[in-house]
Amino acid sequence: MSKVLIIGAGGVSSVAVHKMAMNASIFTEIHLASRTKSKCDAIAKSVKERTGVDIATYEIDAEEVPALTRLIRQVEPKLVVNLALPYQDLPIMDACLEAGVHYLDTANYEPKDEAKFEYKWQWAYQEKFREKGLMALLGSGFDPGVTSVFAMWLKKHKLSTIRTLDILDCNGGDHGQAFATNFNPEINIREVTAPARHWEKGEWVETPAMQISQSFDFDQVGPKNMYLMYHEELESLSKFVPELERARFWMTFGDEYIKHLTVLQNVGLTGIEPITYQGKEIVPLQFLAAVLPKPETLGETTKGKTNIGDIATGEALDGSGEKTFYIYNICDHEEANAETGNQAVSYTTGVPAMVGAAMMLTGRWSGEGVFNMEQLDPDPFLEMLATNGLPWQVKELPAPLDF
């Protein structure tokens, strides 16, 4: 049906490309480009072995807009799927505008020199995409992504309003490493060390990073400590669910992770300001990312499950008063690796990227301008998600969260 060009060759990209190849009736031609072509070739080799589908590969610097524009025009895809680093969102959007191609990503833009991620830079592209008759879909991963779609499904089918919303992200997996991150180390550590923020009574409330925690008993994982953090879907949810009184994001971390991260912070290795070392300028966090295990190498050793979902409280659609619902997915690391060669954290982002792309290519989701997941019909997305490795469930809770 359609030709697609994917930018980036990490674990998320590997999952997305494998799953696209498994949906060949939608993704009839798949092209993959990255700064390191050998990574693209490795993904293409795995896809060929697992599915028999051929993937064309290219070398490209996604921040070089003229070169990327030329590649897009050479390939002539219907859609560019950006699975590169968040720093590269804007140049890839610029290239898509120049080449006249639709755009999708999984995480919002953040500048290299500031650990701050928000949608304002990409929302500013609204008129540019609308004038070109193009669609840009932002945040089609799991969180952001599926968590927003979960909220809108609840609002469509269970609740007339959402008063409070808590997003709970639990990784119950064990990769056997002393310290490693389950997605890009640089992005992961920037997120975790940034101040926490949550939405309450029409404003942002900021607290120090990793200072507020709660214990929660996750289905098929067990009790875990989870920490209040800021995550970009809180911004879009507070915009598109205007009645929200409170919205929070929680992520689980083990004691060993916290201990190692604290030491790395204390010695300055999580810093993003350049320093001079032996006459060369380096960024400490980028150096740290270079020596840590690559997330795409953790698939073979990671065991356990993830559990990610939303707990929402609001007025019931049937008029029966206030109710609380919990909607979530459980993903098994070993099953994800057996299917695509990647652990569940990459899988839970790569599959929604594929599904979002499928929604656009099949016309189930369409429009002109820049869109967040909350603005689109949740039903077809969640239907396809469930049949492509990420089934979900919803249950009513007896009461709202007591914290």
Image: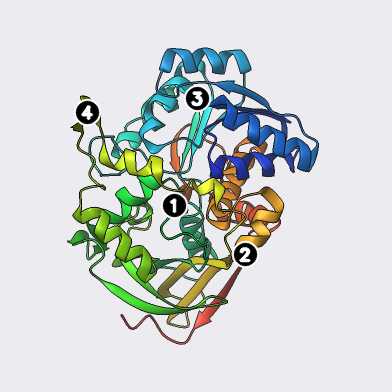
Calculate the distance from the C-alpha at mark 2 to the C-alpha at mark 3: 40 Å
The Cα atoms of the two marked residues, 4 and 3, are separated by 50 Å
Quarter of the image with the C terminus in it: bottom left
Residue 39 position in % (x across, y down): 58, 32
Residue for point 42% across, 36% down: 85
User: Where 201 falls versus 79 (above or below)?
Assistant: below
Q: Position of residue 206 (x, y in %)?
A: 18, 60
Tag 4 and tag 3, C-beta contact below 8 Å = no
Amino acid identity at mark 2: Asp
Label of residue 144 in the image: 1
SS category of the residue bearing label 4 = loop
Residue 332 is tagged as: 2
Looking at the image, is mark 2 or mark 3 earlier in the sequence? 3
Mark yes or no: residue 273 visible.
Answer: yes
Residue 133: mark: 3
Instruction: Give residue 120's position: percent from left, percent from top.
Output: 29, 39
Residue named by callout 4: 278
Residues tagged 4 and 1 counted as in contact (Cβ below 8 A): no
